[in-house]
Structures are given as structure tokens and as C-alpha cells.
Image (cartoon, rainbow, N blue to C red):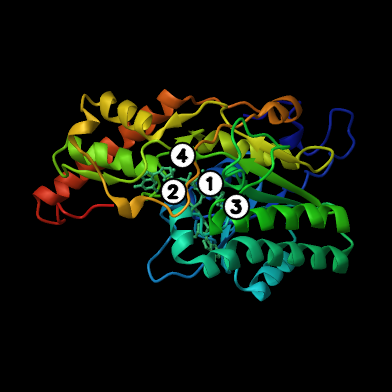
Amino acid sequence: MASETDTTRSGSTPNGSAPDPPEPRKVALITGITGQDGSYLTEFLLNKGYDVHGLIRRSSNFNTQRINHIYIDPHNAHKARMKLHYADLTDASSLRRWIDTIAPNEVYNLAAQSHVAVSFEIPDYTADVVATGALRLLEAVRSHIAATGRTDIKYYQAGSSEMFGATPPPQSETTPFHPRSPYAVSKCAAHWYTVNYREAYGLFACNGILFNHESPKRGENFVTRKITRAVGRIKVGLQSKLFLGNLQASRDWGFAGDYVEAMWMMLQQEKPDDYVVATEESHTVEEFLEASFGYVGLNWRDHVLIDKRYLRPSEVDNLKGDATKAKKELGWKPKVGFQQLVKMMVDEDVELAKREKVLVDAGYMDAQQQP
Ligand code: NDP
Ligand code: GDR
């Protein structure tokens, strides 16, 4: 029941004057909303009271599995605060149209062909989406500002620790880039486009230089999820071997849910800037194997085989971030550590494998189907 001082319900303030109209909700536009980070960022922004618009690309199968749990049919206009629209980072006209139509306060450019090894196979396409795609989106924002005179629009670019590549750790905002893949070179271009639009046009544009971040929603062909999926399937007897590439590479692995908060924090600052986001702790792929197989009582050496197909033409050996600036200026820090991350992912993937086993035993799924 509303109390007498509940101004949001009574319609007037205690001194009798009309209440202030409610603040209009902030509007965010996210590219890559169907990806790992897109799903966590959408949850985060909806909880902050934002309206969220996501750009999705057409695919022959539905590609919205990671956000289905927060999707509300748009016919339910009062409740549906996440809306999806077709667009593609390779299609400038679609980006311009949605920026002009939605007129967002914050634009998060998360879309990418984000697999490093695949970028060696499809380099042109990777550059088109990752590098030129970012440029197209920046241009759409710039022309929207030029046409409307708006000053309240902010842009986030999903940069990557892969840009540091061969430069030894610890890597911070002042560390030189030495990219080692078509993906990483493209991310460097997107980084500098973003800096250039900030300097040339005064755009509020930030680069987040994020180190690897994982979760149970991680794509199944990235090494952490590939491992935890295998752990689950081996544990329930659906798989016995796991083929991997370089086990000596070291990565600074954090939890994706923590990292999307840093993205948002960057856009709440007085001035736009670039920030490294990392746990400042690095582990080899082999250490990830030890931790994840060991957690369920298995020995990874009994199951893992090396397949040279998973070695990259040029590798990034060692990434470990220095996130001093983000900690000091944004007040950000990671909440989930390495062991906790491993447990979270293994727990979810053991449960998933148990459900798969039920389908296999009932004859609805082939046991050989593997990620
Ligand atoms: P994912 O691969 O999980 O998601 C990528 C998203 O981009 C998906 O929604 C995908 O759509 C979309 N996408 C791909 N190509 C296009 C295109 N041509 N047009 C429109 N959308 C497209 O990546 P993450 O969520 O892990 O990463 C988010 C961003 O952060 C990426 O830019 C990535 O490069 C970068 N990054 C990620 C890090 C990490 O450790 N996760 C670390 C540093 C940077 P669909 O679902 O249809 O495939
Ligand atoms: P990365 O992530 O290349 O760091 O890019 P990935 O998980 O693909 O590789 C990490 C390391 O593991 C080694 N590795 C294998 N990798 C894969 N995918 N599959 C294997 O079988 C395998 N065996 C060993 C790799 O050689 C590498 O050294 C991720 C992506 O999310 C990027 O988009 C993001 O920008 C960076 O993280 C930061």
C-alpha cells in the first residue's frame, strides 16, 4: 500500500507542488548483442533501467539463444525494454538507419568476427567487420550528431589485448601494439579509428582494451569453453578425447560479467579515454586443464591430445594486463578469480552434459556430436 509520502503514487509532493516528471530512460544500442558480452551487457543495462536496442544479423538458424531468457515480445509494449533489429556491420545503410531511428545515448560496438584462429582463414571478412565495421558505425554516429546537433551520445569500442600481441607483459594503456593475426590488426585499426574520431570530431568515444574474459556463455570453440565442455562430456561418458593446440600460451582470464560493468563505467566518466581491463593474473592453457579436469577428479593427461590444426601461424605467447588505470579512475575491480571462474564454467557444463546424456540415452541425439 502507498504511504502518504509516496510521491510517485500520490501525484503531488508533500508541499503540494506537482512532482518532477520522471527522468526519461537512457537508451543503449548494442552491436553483437547475441554474443557472450552482448548478453551480459544487456542484462546489466536493463537492471540499470536502460532501454536496450540490439542489432542482430540474419542467420539461417535463430542466433538469439544467449538473450532468449530476457526477451519479451514487443507487442507487450510496457514490459519489452529490449528490442532487436536486423543490421550488419558490413552494411553501412543499416547502421545509419538504426542510429538515426533509435537516437541512442550510448552505443556499444561489440560485434566482431572474434575468433583469432578463424581470422587467418577469412582475413578479408574479418577486416571488413572488425576494422571497417567500426568505422562505418563511427561514421553513422558522426553523421547523426551533425544532423541533430546532439551532444549526449557516447561510443564504446570493444578493443582487445590481442592488439599487444608479441609485446611482453605486463601490458597497459602505454604498451606498444604488436598484433599477430588479421583479427588483432583489425582491432588495432578499430582502436585508432576510435581515437581519431575523438580527436577530430570531439566524439565521446572510449576504447576498452579487454583481456580474455570467459563464462558459461562463452563460444564453444574458444579454448576455455572447449575444455569445460569436454570435461562435462568426459565426466558423464559422452566423450573420451580432447584435441587441442598450444598448451603453453598464457592468458589473463577474467569473468565476462565483471568486464561488461567496466564498459559501462567508461561511458559514465567526465571525459572519454582508453582503459585496460584485466585481472592482472595469467595462467597457461595447461594450468586451465589442470584446474578444470582436477575439479571433477579427472587427470587431463589421460584425455588430451595435440592436433597441429589448432596451432596458429603466429601465436600470442603471454598476455597479462596492468589494470591500474581502470582501478584508479573507474573504481573497477574484478570480483571473480581464476579458480572460481573455472568452477563456474565446469559446473554449468557438467549439468549441460547430463542433459545431453538423457537425450543420447533416449536416442534423440548422437553421442558423437561434439562442439
Ligand atoms: P562473440 O563472438 O561471442 O560475439 C560476437 C557478436 O558479434 C555476436 O553477436 C555476432 O553475431 C556478432 N557479429 C559477428 N559478425 C557480425 C556482423 N558482420 N554484423 C553484425 N554482428 C556481427 O564475442 P564476445 O561477446 O566474446 O566479444 C565481444 C567483443 O569484444 C568482440 O568485438 C570481441 O572481439 C571483443 N573482445 C572479446 C574478448 C573476450 O575475451 N571475450 C576480449 C577482448 C575483446 P552472431 O551471434 O550472429 O554470430
Ligand atoms: P584468444 O582465445 O585467441 O586469446 O582470443 P582462444 O580461447 O581462442 O585461445 C587462447 C589460447 O589457447 C590456445 N589454444 C587453443 N585455442 C582454441 N581456440 N582452440 C584450441 O583447441 C586451442 N588449443 C590451444 C590458443 O592458441 C591461444 O593461445 C580471445 C577472443 O575472445 C578474442 O576475440 C579476444 O580479443 C581475445 O581473447 C582477448
Label of residue 81 in the image: 3
Q: Amino acid at mark 3?
A: Arg
Q: Is residue 368 left or right of residue 84?
A: left
Residue 32 quadrant: bottom right
Disc 2 crowd, CA 10 A, few/some/many (<14, 14-19, 20+): few
Q: Which residue is the site of mark 2?
A: 69
Q: Does ligand 1 reach within 8 Å of label 1's beta carbon? A: yes
Q: CA distance from mark 3 to mark 1?
A: 18 Å
Q: Secondary structure at mark 4?
A: strand
Pick whichever of labels 4 and 3 is earlier in the sequence: 3
Q: CA distance from mark 4 to mark 2?
A: 19 Å
- Residue at x-position 59% and y-position 42%: 161
Q: Which residue is the site of mark 4?
A: 214
Residue 214 spot, x, y in % from top left: 46, 39
The one of 294 and 249 positioned closer to us in this rendering: 249
In the depicted structure, whether residue 164 falls above or below residue 339: below
Pick whichever of labels 2 and 3 is earlier in the sequence: 2
Query: Looking at the image, can residue 115 be seen?
Result: no
Q: Does ligand 1 reach within 8 Å of label 2's beta carbon? A: no
Query: Looking at the image, can residue 189 be seen?
Result: yes
Q: CA distance from mark 4 to mark 1?
A: 9 Å
Pick whichever of labels 4 and 1 is earlier in the sequence: 1
Residue 296 quadrant: top left
Q: Amino acid at mark 1?
A: Asp
Disc 1 crowd, CA 10 A, few/some/many (<14, 14-19, 20+): many
- Residue at x-position 48% and y-position 24%: 337
Q: Secondary structure at mark 1?
A: helix
Nearer the observer: mark 1 or 2; the answer is 1
Label of residue 37 in the image: 1
In the depicted structure, whether residue 298 falls above or below residue 145: above
Pick whichever of labels 1 and 2 is earlier in the sequence: 1
